[in-house]
Image (tube, coloured by chain):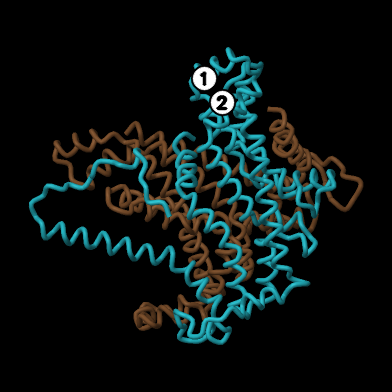
Chain colours: A cyan, B brown
Amino acid sequence: MSLTTSAQEVEPDRTPSNRPVRARSLVRTGSFWALLLVLTVVFVGPILWMFLTSLKTNPEATSVPPTILPEQPTTAAYEGLLRLDGSYPVLRWFFNSLLAATLHMLLVLFVASTAAYALARLRFRFRGVFFAVIVSTLFVPGFIFLMPNYLIIDRLGWLDTIWALVVPGAAGAFGVFFLRQFFAMLPDELEEAALIDGANQWQIFTQVALPNAKPALATLAVLSFLTNWNDFIWPIYVLFSPERLTLPAGLRLLQGAYTTDYPVMMAGAFVASVPVLILFIFTQRYVIEGVARSGLKG
Amino acid sequence: MAPFLAIFITFVALPAVLGLWMSLHDWDYMFEVRPFVGLENYFNLFDSASAAYQMFWNGMRATAIFTVASVPLLMAVPLALAVLLNRRFAGRTFFRAVFFMPYVLGVAVVGLLFRFALDPNIGIINAGISALGLEGVLNALGISTPIPWITAQPWAWISLVLMTVWWTLGFNTIIYLAGLQDIPRELYDAAKVDGASGWQQFRHVTLPGLRNVILFVVIITTLASANMFGQSVMVTGGGPGDSTRTALMVILGEGLESFRMGSAAAMSYLLAVFLGIVSIINVLLVRGRRRS
């Protein structure tokens, strides 16, 4: 996990540090760290507990009082999860989720970057109108689109296919809004130099603008992957065949059918969490930056 | 621009209009003929004799209860955390990531996790209460144990609200933190020179400095609460009774399970109008405070 702090984060200390009462400040520092420790347990504990439960036998997982660490760690729950294959093809769900989230991410990067570049750097009629319409959809509640989109997907013959997961959300306003700021900040000199070298707009876009926007593209990539991987409402309604479900939609079925085998349930939940947790641990700087930006410049 | 516009028009612009069109028709997915009925779908939602009335307003009430209970918590707790994390100390970035971590899990995972943790008989939360010897305290307060977290009200609401706070609080915390870092340090210095206490600094420097951020957070959080769906589906199944069956569950049941899409579209537009009104009230409240 990256512990580096960016320049922006190195802020002057806001606690009154030069108070002479040293004992009091010791107590304060102590309680500050105690509070942080408790909060860390509250936030990481349940995730850890999900993993620990998945290593227990069902009798141990449901014993009263509960054990924290598994007495005899076993991977039986994971084997159980695989044995459900057939009616509950968990591995298939995993790869369906992975494929859908990856394709969705790539599509978002492509359509958002081309649109954002056009809106930031090209002069054309109604540019302002386009931008205003796109940004205004940020404040339209998503449920408005669910039913009409279901009909459109049906018309396109995309029901129960991966395209239903990949395409509809790809024209989100956030990506365009977010990337446009980066492209707008590019110095004009870079563009002019490229023009003098005989580059056309497409070459400027791919060879000048995109490489300069790498951090923003990385942020958008991670955020769109996370959103798609975790999506719940849409997949449970547009997918029907058991072998085509995503993991979240599959977990809902598991929940209905296996409410008594808790290690298997927790193993399923853990399998669905691992990719996003790993992705988050390695890219948390980008994720957090992206979220922070969405609030400040909104 | 073209690829974006193609998707945008097909899946954002067209559906917004198509939804309105559907809401003005007796639009049943199963039938070929979908006659124009004008505003009848909307009137039905206000007519206590219609089939949709009871279901819809029960869902609206559930969504309203959830929103009223969760939004203040999701405003206040992340603000306190953000102020805490805004101090300079080793590992600040680490703790920021820790509080954000649950947010990257999906609602299906969080739902499964809490369905297990909240189980009245074998769940770790009731086990923790008895391990800490809190049963006596709860009984003295008139609360019988084990607590029926999922199967009785108001416990079901308390469970759904608290798990949502746990799950999503990192998002608002990060937005507040970014806002805090934009408040000029000189303002705090000036306040200290004037002899302002920590609380006075918070009241007169931090809060005014965060006004726009607070407005953004309250609107985004209200929108998210109004979308409440997965938590109820995974943890309570809409129960006990129909008490946690939210508006979105009702809308999707009507539209995509019973396939009465015209009626369901009318419901979703009515909910959107309510949300718009709530947002406008929020803007006025936050703006109003600026003048005083």
The residue where tag 2 is placed is A208
Q: Is residue B227 left or right of residue B6?
A: left
The quarter of the picture where residue A121 lies is: top right
Q: Which mark is residue B259?
A: none
Q: Amino acid at mark 1?
A: Leu
Q: Neighbour class for label 2 at 10 Å: few (<14), some, many (≥20)?
A: some
Residue B121 appears in the figure: no
Label 2 vs 1, first from the N-terminus: 1
Expressed as whole percent of the image width and height from the top left, the position of residue A291 reads: 48, 44
Expressed as whole percent of the image width and height from the top left, the position of residue B103 reads: 50, 55
Q: Are marks 2 and 1 in contact (CB under 8 Å)?
A: yes
Expressed as whole percent of the image width and height from the top left, the position of residue A45 reads: 44, 68
Q: Amino acid at mark 2?
A: Val
Q: Neighbour class for label 1 at 10 Å: few (<14), some, many (≥20)?
A: few
Badge 2 element: helix
Q: Residue at x 56, y 33 (%)?
A: A177
Q: Is residue B221 left or right of residue B29?
A: left
Badge 1 element: helix
A31 w.r.t. A138: above or below = below
Q: Nearer the viewer, residue A2 or A244?
A: A2
B271 w.r.t. B123: above or below = above
The residue where tag 1 is placed is A190
